[in-house]
Amino acid sequence: MLQEDEVYIGAKAFLKANGWTLLGGQPPSGCNHLPVIEIKDPNRVSIGSKGAYKPDLVAHRDGVTMIVECKPDFSKMDEAKLLGILSDAGKRRELYNEMLKRNLFKRHRVQVGQEEFDAKLRGALAHSGSARSHGSLLILSIVDMEGGGQALCPAGDPVFKGLFQRR
Amino acid sequence: MLKYSIYCDNRVEGLWFKGLSASLSAATLHLIGGRGSNPSVVDDLVRYDRPDIILLADEKPVMVVEKTREVPTGHNVGQRIARLVRAVESNVLTIKFFPFDARKHGTYSGVCNLNIRLLEAFAAMTRIHRVPILAVNWPVDTHGELVDDGTEDDRVKAVVDNYLKTSHDNGCGEIRAQQKIMDDEYKARLARRGAYARPPGSVVSMLSKSLDGYINGTSQKEIRARFMSRPNTLLYQIGMTPENCKRQDPYTGMQFIYDYLLCRNGADPADKHTNLVLRFPNLTREEWYKNNPNNPNTKSCNWYITANGFWFKDGLDLLR
């Protein structure tokens, strides 16, 4: 099984090889070139980053924006974290606004309005455990740091159609 | 041909570093482990704290690199300094790659600027240890966002590549060019904000003899005599409270900056023209020592590396 940082590196390589644009994120430790995106709790009372959620990766392709969490194996906690963001209109809006503030769409020539963003925002769990589909989240089954792996799309979600064909 | 080994805090940074120069294409990547689990040359460099990158050439350390997205301003100035000091003390070329100016997001979003005391401290460290410590700017776009299209690495690539291709020449062209860039930045920013030429409010200079009556009786006679032989003492006031007195950042890093800027004149921490005393006006000796022991296995030991003394509510303890 890969370590968390290996899954992170592998997921980045896999997404890039499949034509996705990496817009932001934060590695498990240290820093890389991607801008860090913070989703603050809309009900927070204090200033600063305390309690904020920082996705490991945020990627975009053809109108679909995807939040990716990376772990060595399938993580129930990450699943709950992602579902929590995806099901909360306030947090989705916060994410969109944070990305706008950081000019991330403009910098990568991505045109997406709040409505389309909201409708096509998806979550993915990247890991190196056994490759099995899981509920409403995409599974990125990562096998190495060079971009090897496969995407297991959630059944019945047409939004991913054609988005994992290598360019 | 030299055999390069990259010791890194994590693989993301390790791979980034490996990509900076073709000379590193065959370099092996290793994670820095806990103290005691690395080759002795690596363990020696992580004694104070762990840098992002340590480069070995044929098992000898030749470069330490720190990479951060944070602008060193406010409390961030002192962060990460101890690990860089350890590198220059060990005569290893040191590079800190960070933005000199960048937008901070949040409620009070705005562009933060580098506190240039850091550049001045780097110049003093270079002079004292006779090895370069470089600040390399991570450029930003017109909105103050960090550039992330690959060109952000151009300058750091040039320095690393030139250094490796010149068989680790500390005086190679790109290192000298980078030192000129740092010097020009310092002068230009000082001209805009002259307050940086003076110490900040948390630092006070006083006559050493005026502290005589506060020195605890347990301090050794020779240490006391050496302390008094330096006419002036610099006090760095640290506002830690009993409720929040187990910490290092940013204070332990700031002490190095003030030490190199205002006290040090030699490579050994004892080589000072002015004493450096850390002042804890809200804490007793007991409260402080209990929470910040001189434990070589934790960052807490950084408190004990360079200061001449700690001044608590109940007296001044001399260390060296």
Image (spheres, rainbow, N blue to C red):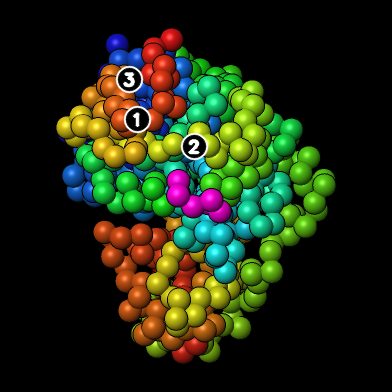
Q: Position of residue B289 (x, y in %)?
A: 35, 78
In this rendering, the label closer to the viewer, 1 or 2: 1
- Disc marking residue A147: 3
Indicate the quadrant containing the C terminus of chain B: top left, top right, bottom left or bottom right. Answer: bottom left
* Magenta span: A85-91
Q: Amino acid at mark 1?
A: Gly
In this rendering, the label closer to the viewer, 1 or 3: 1
Whether residue A163 appears in this view of the structure is yes
Query: How many other residues sit within 10 Å of disc 1, few (<14), some (14-19) or many (≥20)?
Result: few
Q: Which residue is mark 1?
A: A156
Q: Is residue A88 magenta?
A: yes
Q: Position of residue B279 (x, y in %)?
A: 53, 76
Q: Amino acid at mark 2?
A: Leu
Task: Please report, as a chain letter, where disc 2 is located.
Answer: A
Indicate the quadrant containing the N terminus of chain B: top left, top right, bottom left or bottom right. Answer: top left
Marks 1/2: CA distance?
Answer: 15 Å
Viewed as shown, does residue A33 lie left or right of B146? left
- First in sequence: mark 1 or mark 3? 3
User: What residue appears at the point 64 percent right and 48 percent down from the top-left corner?
Assistant: B104
Q: Is residue B303 magenta?
A: no
Name the secondary structure under disc 1. Answer: loop
User: What residue appears at the point 45 percent right and 49 percent down from the top-left corner?
Assistant: A87
User: What residue appears at the point 39 percent right and 13 percent down from the top-left corner?
Assistant: A165
* Front one among B315 and B4: B4
Q: Which residue is mark 2?
A: A121
